[in-house]
Image (spheres, rainbow, N blue to C red):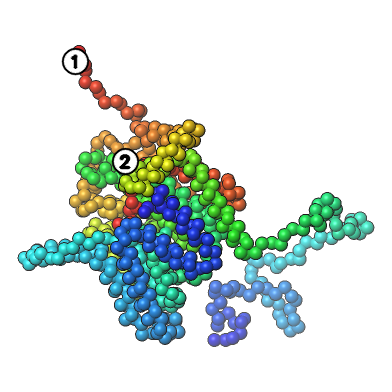
Amino acid sequence: MSDDPDDLDAIPLAPFPTAIPASPFPPRQGETPVPGPPGQPVDADPPSDWIERADAHDLSVSHKTQRENALIALGRFAFPPEPAPGDDEMAARDRRWTSRIIAVATVFLLVFNAASIQNWSRQQPPGWVTATVQQLSDVWSAQLMQLGADQPRQTVRDAYHALTEARFGGPPTPPATPPSTD
Amino acid sequence: MLFPTLAFGVFFLFVYLTTWSFDRENGRRKLFLLLASWFFYAQWDWRFVGLLIGSAVLNWGVAALIAQKPVDAEGRRIGARWLVGLGVAANLLILGVFKYYGFFIEQAGELLAQFGWGRDLPLLQVVLPVGISFFTFQGISYVVDVHRGRTPPARSLLDVMLLMSFFPHLVAGPIVRASDLLPQFERVPRLTRAMAAHGLLLIVWGLFKKTVIASELSVRLVDPVFFDPTAYGALDLAAAVYGYAVQIYCDFSAYSDMAIGIAALLGYSFPRNFDQPYRASSMQAFWRRWHISLSSFLRDYLYVPLGGGRQGLFASCINVFVTMLLGGLWHGAAWTFVAWGALHGSVQVAERLGKAVLGQRRLIPGWLGVLITFHIVCLGWILFRAENFSMAMQVLEGLGRFQTASLVTPFLVLLIVGGLAMHWLPPRAIEGLAERLKVAPFVTMGVLIGLAILLIEAVRPDGVAPFIYFQF
């Protein structure tokens, strides 16, 4: 096998490019120009951004295009921004963010979903812990019911129940009652 | 202790707060997670915690012996084949005793009776430890990967014990390999906003799939129909079969989603286990999307050692068939599961032969492939759900019996259609949503999560059935 990188027959190049791109430079002395692959246009120079009618004196010589507000500059001077947090600081922030989410969701559910704790405690085998949790959840649920915190859950539950009871062809017919013998 | 229960919620809050309070003390964190995992497992049967410990010690010991052997150019351990065989055999023996002893003894008794040698064989009522199929497979993967040089041996017994006992994946997977999890155990885990948002969304989504879709379909449709298929007509039976397809997907993928989400909140990353499986247009594609951790396990530790596709078309067909057959038996000690595996295996063999004849030409459009594959999968689910062949035949016969539907309601149709339609959501919808929500303030995110759980809690039936895959 040849070590010549231009020897395409000797080296299986795939998955690398298998065609040598045309050189952007003119052929060296004694070389014949290598034609590019058919159908591929030679890269042209990028279009010039030279403006024929422009006068150099019209161009701005100032590097600052906007003046910074003096108050903002003073604020930055008086209270310089803190250095960017490191990895540990970022990790701690992300953990705090997650923990707070869990805390908010827990409080939200304790308020609006108190019935679940009540249901759960009633399903547990009897015992001191279960009885205590049950009593606490009963009191908690009763207090929140007075505030109406159970209403969103109950409304959704009622609507869902109606959906589950729907039948094809209209509402379910009530069972026929036997005629009265009076 | 099931994931979608208040008891687990309290347990997880305690574990979450304690784990992160260890900050950089990784050893104590792992020890605490191990104790928490054993406590979690002991809620089913504390006696099997000993089995879990014994299995971990066994695999750690075998891997440590393998690691002492010299390494060849490919990274494999030289002269350790017998040790690998010993380790794999010991794991399979544990699985065999607890899961298949009764089945094989029963079959042997029937076989002997047919030859007139009927004997009272020693039948034992062995209680099946929850999740034994999963943690023995993890043990096998650890031993084999150490031999193959894919993963270095664990630094301590603690790591191997935690690998096999880590509570998010302990009872129903996903089967997380040592090469995925051990490197994570060696460093202090880090929780990022993206991970947390993704984990929380996966937990909520899993909760919805399990407690609403899977539970409702199970209670209102699938269980009554499969209890007595002769009492129902074609419409109810067809709805129950489609319903079971949605139920088992929502049940099992929900467990995987919640496991991945819970692990993410503890700073660990688990691989994806489902990828919209009913979108598959062939059986081969189905197994790339369904229970991915099992199908890749079967591929790497069974199909490839059998010879894979290296020995020609005929051998590869046999290897695929045998792999699927054993995959079926892994799901349960019953002939219906073997038949289920045989169905999946034979369809894959047919697909391979078809591909060998036709090449890349496609005879049918993609949507028709999806439809056909889904219905073959549904046929398999009948075998999977039925308690025996007679019941499966009753379901199949009933599909030709036309009578008024008595169980199908608009609500159940909505659940089935919704359960199938979720396969056509954008493939990475949860990740995309998590990316958007990770910049939200914690109050907004907390209220959103609370609201989503409140809606689920408001509509879910009381109580929760165990996950289907717990029995495997």
Q: Position of residue B330 (x, y in %)?
A: 29, 63
Mark carried by residue B163: none
Quarter holding residue B398? top left
- Name the residue that disc number 1 marks: A181
Q: Residue furthest right?
A: A57
Is B467 situated left or right of B264 in this image?
left
Quarter holding residue A30? bottom right
Would residue B103 be visible to someone looking at this image? no
- Identify residue type, mark 2: Arg
Residue at point 34%, 74% (across, down):
B58
Q: Nearer the viewer, residue A150 or B203?
A: A150
Residue at point 63%, 62% (across, down):
A89
Is B23 situated left or right of B231 in this image?
right
Residue at mark 2 to residue at mark 1: CA–CA distance: 38 Å
Q: Position of residue B230 (x, y in %)?
A: 20, 42
Quarter holding residue B316? bottom left
- Name the residue that disc number 2 marks: B220
Would residue A130 be visible to someone looking at this image? yes
Residue at point 23%, 64% (across, down):
B100
Count residues near mark 1 (Cα–Cα under 10 Å), then give few for <14, some for 14-19, many for 20+: few
Count residues near mark 2 (Cα–Cα under 10 Å), then give few for <14, some for 14-19, many for 20+: some
- Identify residue type, mark 1: Thr
Q: Nearer the viewer, residue A7 or B185?
A: B185
Is B96 situated left or right of B271 in this image?
left
Q: Mark 2: which secondary structure?
A: helix
Quadrant assignment for the N terminus of chain B: bottom left
